[in-house]
């Protein structure tokens, strides 16, 4: 929304402040979620109807997918072939308006495979061309758009990442960003959940031969443009990552500076960067601001890590105003706290929290009680 008159703009901003204050935040548990440290419910995203999705880790440390509709009803599932050992199972990544989910599963040998689950619960499993079949190798399906196109990446037999696009009909195109490294742990990946636009534009990141990160955007015709945020470091583990993009082509992301401090940015369609840090974000290595989601209105959500390495949620409005929050029951020790991942057009936010015992719980922050 673009309002030109100052008085009306101020009214809208005051109304938005009131809505933010009135937001309701609840936590939830998927049926069967474990209650020990490292177990529990991890919401990954939310659609325009308020359906949340993600995965939960059971008492045996096996992962299973879930859908939670707006009234709290759960559907849980496991992909055919998913392993039943600790660290194996089914992981949900992205949901399109048709109700088709995509993600990946880890089989009994530790190999990853992509899947699609349609509205009726029917599965299609797939492997990207060239994907390895050893432990820690295979296919990670990360995004699905309204057309049914899927984007993600795979790890080959040498541990190198390669990005792919899979059409609704099942044909694959694989690609590499220029400058991507060819060693184990290097290569080209995509952003997750919102990394693929309806028109086929993809965002992601690649790791070069020096193990530095660089973001990229790939146009529908296959043209790839590298993204390096001003201030990003160029050492190992430093550089620029992307979190996805919205319908307007706006890209949120994160960069690691030369001191390994984390900062947020928003990149406009014309390539202009706006960098930001949430007030209260720590300035030590591994601390700072971590954007995760971006909705159609241009609001960014994510987490920031304070000077005690505790995580808290934030929302940044399209005009740059930042509001912070904590999910009920979130832990207050290092490595604990609130981790928002995605926001929908209504302004509802989902993600997970880690409590004082190290258990994961899903949360939903909504302008309406749900």
Image: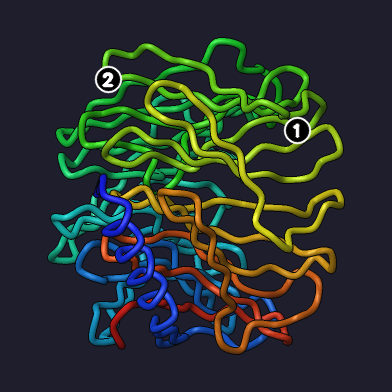
Residue at 13% in and 66% down = 120
Q: Would you say residue 264 is visible in this rendering?
A: yes
Q: Would you say residue 28 is visible in this rendering?
A: no
Residue at 42% in and 69% down = 350
Residue at 30% in and 63% down = 12
Disc 2 to disc 1, C-alpha distance? 28 Å
Q: Quadrant of residue 312?
A: bottom right
Mark 2 surroundings within 10 Å by alpha-carbon count, few (fewer than 14), some (14 through 19), many (20 or more):
few
* Residue at image mark 2: 220
Please say if 14 is above or below 150: below
Residue 172: image location, x then y, percent: 29, 25
- Residue closest to the eye, 41 or 87: 41
Residue 336: image location, x then y, percent: 71, 74
Is tag 2's residue or tag 1's residue first in the polypeptide sequence? 2
Please say if 106 is above or below 366: above
* Rendered-image quadrant of the C terminus: bottom left
Label 1: which secondary element: loop
Please say if 151 is above or below 269: below
- Residue closest to the eye, 368 or 19: 19
Residue 137: image location, x then y, percent: 57, 39
Instruction: Tell me the tag on residue 164.
Output: none
* Residue at image mark 1: 238
Counting labels gives 2
């Amino acid at each position: 929304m673009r309002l030109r008159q100052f008085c009306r703009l101020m009214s809208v901003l005051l109304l938005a402040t009131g809505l933010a204050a009135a937001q309701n935040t609840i936590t939830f548990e998927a049926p069967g979620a474990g209650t020990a440290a490292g177990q529990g419910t991890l919401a990954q995203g939310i659609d325009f109807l308020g359906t949340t999705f993600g995965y939960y880790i059971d008492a045996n440390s096996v992962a299973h997918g879930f859908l939670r509709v707006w009234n709290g009803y759960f559907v849980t599932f496991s992909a055919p072939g998913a392993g039943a050992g600790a660290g194996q199972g089914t992981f949900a990544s992205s949901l399109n308006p048709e109700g088709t989910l995509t993600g990946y599963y880890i089989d009994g040998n530790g190999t990853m495979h992509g899947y699609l689950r349609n509205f009726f619960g029917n599965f299609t499993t797939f492997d990207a061309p060239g994907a390895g079949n050893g432990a820690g190798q295979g296919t990670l399906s990360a995004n699905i758009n309204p057309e049914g196109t899927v984007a993600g990446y795979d790890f080959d037999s040498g541990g190198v990442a390669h990005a792919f696009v899979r059409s609704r009909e099942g044909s694959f195109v694989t690609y590499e960003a220029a400058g991507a490294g060819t060693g184990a742990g290097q290569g080209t990946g995509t952003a997750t959940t919102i990394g693929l636009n309806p028109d086929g534009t993809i965002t992601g990141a690649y790791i070069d031969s020096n193990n530095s990160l660089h973001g990229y955007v790939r146009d529908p015709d296959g043209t790839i443009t590298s993204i390096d945020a001003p201030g990003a470091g160029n050492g190992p583990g430093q550089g620029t990552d992307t979190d996805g993009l919205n319908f307007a082509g706006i890209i949120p992301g994160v960069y690691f500076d030369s001191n390994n401090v984390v900062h947020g940015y928003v990149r406009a369609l014309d390539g202009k960067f706006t960098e930001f840090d949430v007030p209260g974000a720590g300035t030590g290595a591994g601390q700072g601001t971590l954007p995760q989601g971006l909705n159609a209105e241009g609001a960014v959500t994510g987490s920031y890590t304070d000077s005690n390495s505790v995580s808290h949620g934030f929302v940044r409005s399209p005009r740059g105003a930042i509001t912070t929050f904590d999910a009920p029951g979130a832990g207050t020790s290092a490595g604990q706290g609130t981790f928002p991942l995605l926001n929908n057009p209504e302004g509802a936010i989902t993600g997970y929290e880690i409590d004082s015992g190290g258990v994961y719980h899903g949360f939903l922050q909504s302008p309406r009680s749900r």
